[in-house]
Image: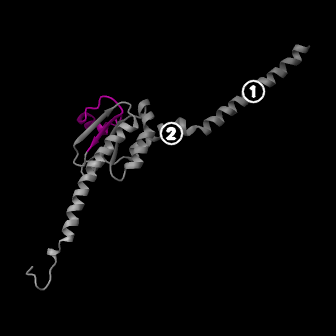
Amino acid sequence: MQSESGEPLLNTNLKAMLILLIAILLIGLVLFRNLLFQPTFLLKSFGELSVDPEIAFKNNKPTFLEFYAEWCEVCKEMAPKVTTLKEEYEKEINFVFLNVDNQKWDNYIRKFNVNGIPQVNLFDRKGNLISTFIGKQEEITIRSSIDQIGRELKTQEEILNNDFSVIKENKNYEINPRSHG
């Protein structure tokens, strides 16, 4: 008779432990959902955040072009790093994200010989290809290439600004009653 009275107690304890385990699992999923699902969400939002490639190559700004796929584990791993770079540089650089599963981008996939993803191509403001990275990259590697493009752009701006400041100091362009201009 003790075994019969002991079994319901064991079943009750087992059920309680199972319910507790399920509750802990659900709470863990809710608390850590950003860590678990953020890269997938970021990849899905890349297409919405993207500058149209036709505009990017014509607006006189450097361009960051990434080919990716939503199912790609390396793309998911790099997504938070790429998002950080985008947030930091988006005022100076176009960010274009093309999903290789979208047939709309086949001409770009062929043009830039995409044979592995993620593939990141960096272009100067004239649309010249500067760097290509295929596969997993450290953020510092891509950042240094972006910074190099940024330094070239700032150097050109500094030269232009110095020229304009010299012209402004020269008063020969002013018209007064004694000038014949």
Which image quarter is the C terminus in? bottom left
> Residue 125: where, in percent of width, then height?
25, 49
Extreme residue toward the right, this view:
1
The boundaries of the magenta stretch are: 99-123
Q: Residues within 10 Å of mark 2 (few under 14, many from 20)?
A: some
Q: Mark number for residue 17?
A: 1
> Residue 8: where, in percent of width, then height?
84, 21
Q: In this view, does 117 lie to the left or right of 6?
A: left
Q: In this view, does 14 lie to the left or right of 109?
A: right
**9 or 90, which lies in front?**
90
Q: Is residue 38 above or below residue 2?
A: below
Label 1 element class:
helix
Q: Which residue is drawn at 16% across and 77% down?
A: 174
Q: What residue type is labelled 1?
A: Met
Q: Which residue has dot 2 on it?
A: 38
**95 or 18, which lies in front?**
95
Label 2 element class:
helix
